[in-house]
Image (cartoon, rainbow, N blue to C red):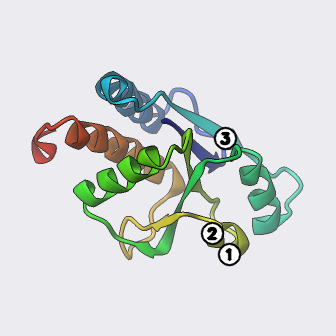
Amino acid sequence: MRIRIAAVGRMAARSPEAALVEDYLTRFAQTGRALGLGPATVAEVEDRRGGGKPAEAALLSRQVPDGAAIIALDERGRTLSSPDFAAALARFGDQGRPEAVCLIGGADGLDPALRDRADLVLSFGAMVWPHMLVRVMLAEQLYRCATILAGGPYHRV
């Protein structure tokens, strides 16, 4: 199962966050390959017309292929342990989903209509995180999921 991170906004190519995302997604690809997970890619969208959340939702929706599982990152979502998140990814794969698309909204979050389409609404806690940092946290958790599913000790990754 392929993984796509679809996010509003552009990350500077040489930023520390971009380096971390690249590192974790490379680790994910290496660990997940034997499990049928990966590769993971990042698709960035940008609403240059200022249409707000509905316009961002339309751009993000274009990144979701037919049959893909949708994972929406939202502060109102469920907080899962790393093993539970890994189990959710495994379930999507067992359902025959060809891809899981993780959606990260812009500064104002995801449009409710898009969030309501999600198979899983996930929160990284009650705190609000900068969306560039959420990309790093998500990439690390994807790598951790692959490690858990491969039988590795997830807390020592």
Q: Quadrant of the C terminus?
A: top left
Q: Would residue 17 be seen by someone viewing this image from the given angle? A: yes
Q: In this rendered view, identify the residue nearer to me: 37 or 105.
A: 37
Q: Residue at x 45, y 30 (%)?
A: 38
- Please name the residue that numbered disc 1 is placed on: 112
Q: Which is in the foreground here, disc 2 or disc 3? A: 2
C-alpha distance separating marks 3 and 1: 20 Å
Q: Residue at x 40, y 42 (%)?
A: 139
* Above or below for 147 versus 138: above
Q: Residues within 10 Å of mark 1 (few under 14, many from 20)?
A: few
Q: Residue at x 51, y 43 (%)?
A: 96
Q: In this rendered view, identify the residue nearer to me: 69 or 56.
A: 69
Hey, which quadrant is residue 33 in on the image? Answer: top left
Relative image position of residue 144 (x, y in whole percent) = 26, 42
Give the structural element (helix, strand or loop) at label 3: strand
- Please name the residue that numbered disc 2 is placed on: 115
The kind of residue tagged 3 is: Glu
C-alpha distance separating marks 2 and 3: 18 Å
Q: Residue furthest right?
A: 49
Relative image position of residue 19 (x, y in whole percent) = 42, 29
The kind of residue tagged 1 is: Pro
